Image: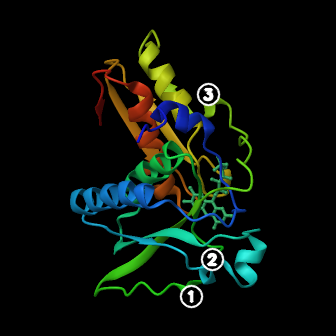
Amino acid sequence: MQLLDIMQAMRLRHSVRSYLDHPIEPEKVEILQSAINEISAASGLRVHLILDEPQAFTGPLAHYGSFKGCKNYIVITGEKGRDEDVGYYGEKLVLLVQQLGMNSCWVALTYNRAKISVALQKGEKLHIVIAIGYGANHGVPHKNKPLAQLCTIECTQTPLWFENAMAAVLKAPTAVNQQKFHFTLCADGKTVRAKALLGPCAKMDLGIAKYHFELGAGDADFIWA
Ligand SMILES: Cc1cc2nc3c(=O)[nH]c(=O)nc-3n(C[C@H](O)[C@H](O)[C@H](O)COP(=O)(O)O)c2cc1C
């Protein structure tokens, strides 16, 4: 199956909360499941694909979050303190879903916890739910903070790869669109420091933004501090 280019998927992705009653085709399920298996092995997180289960997006919270018709979702569970990894690896799946011609929404709060039947192992918590499926719409672009507020450049000239990486960061989803992170290109023009500021899910957002940064930077020879 031909996948949409990942940079194009990043540009097209917006949170979608209303879904069509259209099942995910078996070949797409297979691609998703195989990515999930790889991510679970690489991250040590447990990633669960739940299909055709309409209950998790019913009830007052889901109503408050304006979710409609969502029957398919991903649940990421794992040890506490893994928020940045959850963001980093979860965004790989979010972009894959977009590459497969579907839509998604990260959901930290507005789902029905009681209806999610994933059994937690000892020491595990439910980190996040990601709604997936065929959207009734494609969502809308979010507002961005001014770039100067999101990054600092300590070297004399800004390399093109850093500009591209920050353009990709601007496309990253963040909880309540807070964009509570800061990227610094150090004086050596090569080392990048990325940190989460204070806010709900800010570390998860940082992991998501770092994945976007890496994609935007392409094959640039940068290193994380
Ligand atoms: C970690 C995280 C948690 C989120 N939790 C929720 C949520 O509980 N309910 C919801 O409707 N949207 C949630 N969102 C979606 C954000 O509101 C959305 O990403 C943000 O407004 C930016 O819009 P965009 O995704 O369309 O670019 C969450 C996003 C992230 C990254």
Whether the residue carrying mark 2 lies under 8 Å from ligand 1 is answered with: yes
Q: Residue at x 73, y 40 (%)?
A: 143
Q: Position of residue 85 (x, y in %)?
A: 35, 57
Q: Does the rendering let one see residue 144?
A: yes
Q: Residue furthest left?
A: 41
Secondary structure under tag 2 reads loop
The quarter holding residue 214 reads top left
State left or right for residue 1 relative to residue 7: left
State left or right for residue 177 relative to residue 88: right
The residue labelled by disc 1 is 115
> Label 3 to label 2, Cα distance in Å?
34 Å
* Residue 111, numbered circle: 2
- Dot 2 and dot 1 residues touching (CB under 8 Å): yes
Tell me the kind of residue under disc 3.
Answer: Ala
Q: Nearer the viewer, residue 138 or 39?
A: 138
> Label 2 to label 1, Cα distance in Å?
9 Å
| Picture layout, residue 118 above or below residue 135 | below
N-terminal label among 3 and 1: 1
The quarter holding residue 104 reads bottom right
Tell me the kind of residue under disc 2.
Answer: Tyr
